[in-house]
Amino acid sequence: MDKKLERILPRGQKPARYTGGEYGEIRKDLSGVELRMALCFPDVYEIGMSNTGMRILYRVINDMPGVWCERVFAPWFDMAEEMRKNALPLYALESGDPLSEFDAVGFSLGYEMAYTTVLEMLSLAGIPMHSRDRETLTPLVFAGGSVCCNPEPMAEYFDLMVVGEGEDVDREVLELLRSAKREGWTKKEFLSRAAKIGGIYVPSLYKPEYAPDGTLAGMTALDGAPETVTKRIMTDFENSCFPVDAMVPNTEIVHDRVGLELFRGCIRGCRFCQAGHIYRPVRNRSVEKLLQQGKEALSFSGYQEITLLSLSSSDYRGLNELCDGLMEYCEPRGIGLSLPSLRADNFSMDIMQRVQKVRKSGLTFAPEAGTQRLRDVINKNVTEEDLLRSCATAFRGGWNSVKLYFMLGLPTETDEDVLGIAELADRVVHCWRENAVNKARGLRVTVSTSCFVPKPHTPFQWEPQVSREEYLRRVTLLRENMKAKAVTYNWHDPETSFTEAVLSRGDRRIGALLEEIWRRGGYLESWSEGFALSRWTDSADKLGLDLTFYANRTRPLTELLPWDHINMGVKKRHFIREYEQAHRGCLSPDCRAACSACGANAFLPGGKCDG
């Protein structure tokens, strides 16, 4: 261990975040390593080590002969300060070597509020933040992850960005970089060739132009770069990598358990949901494969809980068979099985009773809106009857705790829709009174609301976000009408949702804003300890940027959007059709009921998804 690190470790919270040496960690002999990659997660250890994508890519890249992939996480505020004071550069956990010594530095980006943390990590590593200032071939600084579906806000910082799923394309980029190192290519030569790899976006090869009103007027591809960058996906998901021997953390993490990925994509068409659109088409793993992977992962890790991962677990066709097979293994060993992402319209008490023999957890449903009218607008395809029927079933089965998630500020929302949330909570309480088998324990209903954030590549990408003042007015209206003592109401603050909307729909000009915010102390902004709205507004004022232009403005369907040159698989005409359906209050069927011809099927052989 570095002597400086050894000296400052006791001064920081949770020193185990910074030491490495976990069970299952991959170490390689440098004499056989041609290319070194740092896989960076712009948040603290507990968050990054819980990320399924990080675990998969760590294994995929380390399976490449001659390539060593190591992990880097953002230090907490106290440790970052100590590292600066003691001139200790940001380092990788496996070797302890500084980030600047790596050939490739790849960031996993799943949340817009992590952007300023990327800048701080590069600064702590002593690596120039802007791509234009890194003139040599290495270190190559790139990013992947869901937010790269709008790459523009971070365009000036990354040499390239991966659009879509990274298992195959990351390997292709690293093989190209290995060739570039061997043959002595310049960085410009490498990026020109990298741009020809499917799913790779090289920001320096695209030039935006803006109209007098501030909107995007054009995006010109330069030097032979493709006009449109199309995402990559794993077509053979059944046989894609799942690390059953993933490392076991040194300290408790957020998701301290085995996470078993059932499928990617979603058969639903919720109009607000970005993940449900950008991860299309649906691809399942077989029950047999999942049973094998789940048992091997539990055996290796020693975890006492396994959870089933997907956007909507209860939509998995083989769920009954899978749960039975896992419980056959788990129950004798005292291992719990949890089922997140349940839907009220296909909730199965039979499954819940089987999987909760070891330990019983609360139930969570996400109606999203308080009235059927608004649920039809967002295409939720869940009725009040579905929810109450599922709650009645659960209460008769002995449950006495329910969490309900909603959004405020959805398109076309009225005060009647807001009050509908309170009325629905009251009906759940009444449902418990009529169906509970053990009323002595009482009831706990938790209602949570967040502020709607319009996201790229969704039918609501043209919609505005309500102002912060209006969101808080609706929160107050709801809070004052939440009467039942059994109901607890929590709401998400609108400030981070506002900045998330700015970044979600931002263009390349947002890059300068991010740097200014970072210079004023913006770091780990997904944490309340690191976020301050005044830092954002003051920075925007200095640069002459209007944040409401990005967050609170309705965009016409004809406007060129900053992400229009990124093809995530769903056709724009599908989004327009769904946008119009929403404003008519019309539902669209899910993928199993009828194909909507969104275009995502074209990514699979034979054009058939597993929906």
Image (tube, helix red, strand yellow):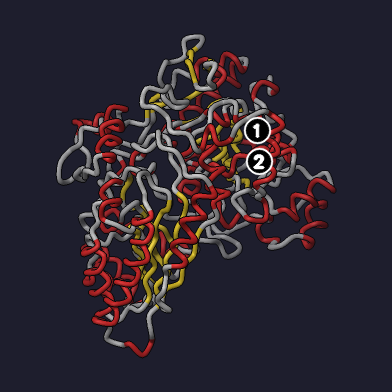
- Residue shown at 19%/44% (left/top)? 589
Res 205 seen here = no
Say which of 166 and 62 sits in front: 166
Tell which residue pokes out farthest to the top in this image: 223
Q: Nearer the viewer, residue 256 or 77?
A: 77
467 vs 189, nearest the viewer: 467
In percent of width and height, residue 366 lies at 35, 59
Q: What secondary structure is found at the residue carrying circle 2?
A: helix
Q: For the residue marked with disc 2, what is the amino acid?
A: Trp
The residue identified by callout 2 is 536
Q: Pointer 1: what residue?
A: 513
Dot 2, how many residues are within 10 Å of its Cα: few (below 14), some (14-19), or many (20+)? many
**On screen, residue 487 above or below 386:** below
Kind of residue at badge 1: Leu
Task: Write the residue at 50% across / 50% down.
Answer: 470
Q: Position of residue 295 (x, y in %)?
A: 35, 63
Residue at the limit of the structure toward the left, as seen here: 593
